[in-house]
């Protein structure tokens, strides 16, 4: 995994009007992003229409969900949307799935939230049904990509990592865990050592299957600066459980000069296997210079 080529995604959430959306997607492609992604939260754009529009506005970028909340979806209806989107994007779709972690959104939608175990059960059922339906020659519409649309599964717990190890083409790590008792999706950043533990757990679960999988990390912040420590001190209130030195090692924070960040990503690819990096929309422009530095590696 350490030698796998870098890929870069950007997770877009702002749709003011159609022209602005198309312009943002074209800018992302010009900046070198390989994948244009959208999340799946109430109050944000509906994923599949946004991805179809993104593909129409661009030429080469793939499009994907990071990630769909499986609790919002019936697997049979989801298979129809996935296949249709793959057709309308010319086979450029990457399907990201997760359990969902914001209880308040389920409540607002009138959908059960349930226990963590129940959410993983539903996601497992969803993955099984999607594999069956989209792998059938009788499914209509038929997706463009074969043997299936590439599947990304994002998670942190052992059951999620096991599901990803068995079924995913791309295994996504958030570098964070849900805050206990939060209904709004508050996350707590993992330290570098905690992330080591999660990746090691994944590798142990994946070893018996012998599958080649790409590892993705969702980066929370990108800041280009000549003074890393000063910039990180301004972020420490977001991570009160970590020291300044621990923040320097935090994989979800990319802070420093372009060369320092590029070196950090090379080191993280060696340490964890992360070759597919996704940034949030506010960091899109800042990350572009790092992408240029790493292109082709």
Image: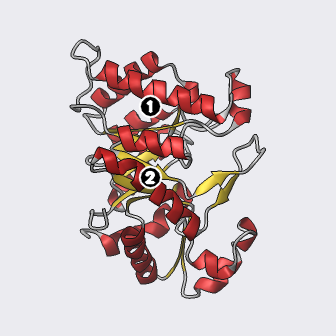
Callout in the foreground (2, 1): 2
Q: How many marks?
A: 2
Q: Identify the residue at horizontal 33%, vertical 75% (top origin).
A: 293
Query: Percent x, y for residue 95?
Result: 39, 37
**Is residue 241 toward the left or the right of residue 130 in the image?**
right
Residue placed most toward the observer, 209 or 284: 209
| Tag 2 secondary structure | helix
| Residue 243, label in figure | none
Instruction: Please say if 150 is above or below 84.
Output: below
Name the quadrant of the C terminus: bottom left
Query: Percent x, y for residue 106?
Result: 68, 28
Q: Which residue is mark 2?
A: 202
Residue placed most toward the observer, 247 or 115: 115
Q: Identify the residue at horizontal 46%, vertical 60% (top origin).
A: 200
Query: Percent x, y for residue 207?
Result: 34, 51
Q: Identify the residue at horizontal 25%, vertical 34% (top origin).
A: 90
**Is residue 92 toward the left or the right of residue 81 in the image?**
left
Q: Identify the residue at horizontal 55%, vertical 46% (top origin).
A: 13
Q: For residue 103, what is the image quadrant?
A: top right
| Residue 48, label in figure | 1
């Amino acid at each position: 995994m350490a030698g796998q080529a870098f890929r870069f995604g950007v997770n877009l959430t702002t749709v003011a009007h159609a022209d602005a959306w198309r312009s943002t997607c074209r800018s992302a492609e010009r900046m070198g992003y390989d994948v244009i992604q959208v999340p799946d939260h109430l109050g944000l754009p509906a994923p599949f229409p946004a991805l179809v529009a993104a593909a129409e506005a661009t030429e080469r970028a793939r499009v994907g969900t990071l990630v769909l909340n499986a609790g919002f979806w019936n697997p049979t209806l989801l298979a129809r949307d996935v296949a249709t989107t793959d057709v309308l994007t010319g086979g450029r779709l990457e399907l990201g799935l997760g359990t969902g972690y914001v209880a308040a959104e389920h409540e607002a939608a009138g959908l059960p939230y349930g226990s963590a175990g129940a959410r993983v059960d539903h996601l497992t059922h969803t993955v099984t049904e999607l594999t069956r339906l989209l792998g059938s020659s009788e499914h209509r519409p038929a997706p463009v990509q074969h043997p299936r649309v590439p599947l990304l599964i994002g998670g942190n717990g052992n059951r999620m990592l096991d599901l990803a190890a068995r079924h995913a083409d791309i295994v996504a790590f958030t570098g964070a865990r849900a805050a206990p008792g939060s209904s709004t999706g508050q996350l707590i950043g993992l330290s570098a050592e905690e992330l080591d533990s999660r990746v090691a757990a994944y590798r142990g679960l994946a070893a018996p299957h012998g599958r080649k999988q790409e590892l993705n990390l969702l980066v929370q912040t990108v800041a280009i600066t000549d003074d890393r420590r000063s910039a990180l001190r301004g972020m420490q209130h977001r991570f009160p459980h970590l020291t300044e030195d621990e923040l320097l090692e935090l994989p979800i924070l990319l802070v420093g000069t372009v060369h320092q960040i590029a070196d950090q990503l090379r080191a993280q690819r060696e340490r964890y296997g992360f070759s597919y990096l996704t940034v949030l929309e506010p960091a899109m422009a800042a990350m572009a210079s790092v992408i240029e530095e790493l292109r082709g590696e």
